[in-house]
Amino acid sequence: MKSGRTIRSIALCTVAAVAYLGPFPAIADTLEGSLVQSYQNNPVLNAQRAALRATDEGVGIALSGYRPRVTATITQGASAVQQGARSGTTGVRSTSPNAALVPQSYGITATQTLYNGNQTGNRTRQAESQVSAARETLRLTEQTVLLNAATAYMNLLRDTAILDLQKRNVEVLQEQLRQTRDRFNVGEVTKTDVAQAESRVAAGRSSMLGAESNYVTSRATYRQVVGIEAGKLAPGSPVDRLSPRTLPSAVEQGRVENPNVTAAALGVDVALLQVKINEGALYPTVSVAGSVTQSMDTSAILPSQFVYTALGTVSVPLYQGGSEYATIRQSKETLGQRRMDLDTQRDSAQQSVVQSWGQLEAAKAQIIATQAQVTAAETALNGVREEARVGQRTTLDVLNAQQELVNARVALVTAQRDRVVASYALLSATGRLSVQVLAVRSPTYDPGVHYQQVRDTWFGVRTPDGK
């Protein structure tokens, strides 16, 4: 009966380790806390945020086409002039002394483009679309990081429970071996029964070592994804309530809101604007330029000059070797490719939603089935033990029943892990896995702050603080 009590204690510890309902002590690491840590500290996510801030600057670069170009020039140097003349009567050449000149000039030139085939406007709209696409890429990275954090958390929770199961299983098998040896000493069982018990103990130790290896790996993965060492993990909760209630609505949402889809749609806009930019190269360019220049000679030999200049220029491209036309055709083909990429991403998003939905439903069913399996295996093991006590069952029957119970509990732990991870995967496939939707207690990164700080900046090389 001692072994039976040990087996029952395994069940209680396992369910407590992986159950995802109910409160848990505050000293434990929580799934929400792990999500917050990864959201704030994950280097992949922070690198993508930096990439978005670099993309923000593209709007300022495009807007510079509306602004004038102003150049200041300063020229200063020295020169010498020697003048000579030949006499018409004597033919003798005469020279005058050298004249030392120190010329200086100061000037400012301003150039303003008035019309360039609307290329500047299209470049600005293209840069804004690129910023929007980069934001969707950042949203995709956020979803990936959060899903990886949830997966790493639940994997470590699962492997911790399985390792505990295997350790306790070895304890039970060792107790079973001790009892078998005692019965062998009094002639109730044979040496074969002892060998079978010894074999199961060795197999149990092997399974425990494998579980320990998985635990160490999961702990290292958790450290990589979340950024901190794992402590005592609290149970994790599924997020089914945040996903659509039916598969058709989930598919529809995924085809519209999945960040891969939205980024691909914005990629179509970028490609379309690139066609217009390239077509603008065929239109005339109109610009005006004004300059002010002051020239002087500090030696006072040459008079000073103050020159004002205002010029208007109209440049009409007639033929440039055909490169403009090839570029336009190339950008149109790229546009067609982006449209096909959008269809591909929609189909991929739909496949991800259906797959995640199926995995979630399967995990729910597996939990119910494995819970029933665990209950039945516990009853069967207790019965086999009692029957073996009166000689109606062999030691091998007891060992097999015990192994079935351990396998059932491992399957239950795995199904509970799959239940939580699949709910996060479904939320990610529909494009709604974010700290805002999850309502975790964490400051959120607002990409619009940096964008507004740099969009209309005319001067300065210092990066702003909107990170």
Image: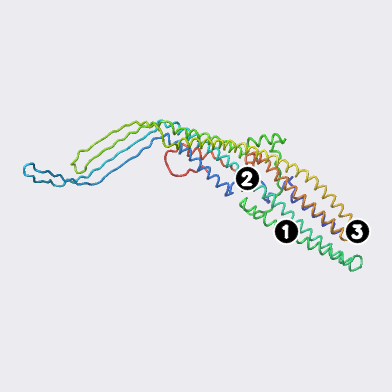
**Residue occupying image coordinates x 30% and y 39%:** 107
In the rendered view, tell whether residue 97 sits above or below residue 251: below
Question: In the visual, does 276 lie left or right of 228?
Answer: left
Q: Which residue is denoted by mark 3 in the rendering?
A: 393
- Residue 327: give x, y in percent of width and height: 48, 37
Q: Which residue is denoted by mark 1 in the rendering?
A: 210
- Name the residue type under label 2: Thr
Query: How many numbered marks are there?
Result: 3
In the rendered view, tell whether residue 75 sits above or below residue 196: above
- Name the residue type under label 1: Gly
- Residue 17: give x, y in percent of width and height: 74, 51
> Could you give the CA–CA distance between mark 3 and mark 1, rounded to whole angstroms?
31 Å
Q: Quadrant of residue 458?
A: top left
Q: Secondary structure at mark 3?
A: loop
Q: Nearer the viewer, residue 221 or 10?
A: 221
For label 3, the crowd category at 10 Å Cα-Cα, with few meaning under 14, some 14 to 19 and many 20 or more, is some
Q: Quadrant of residue 341?
A: top right
Q: Secondary structure at mark 2?
A: helix
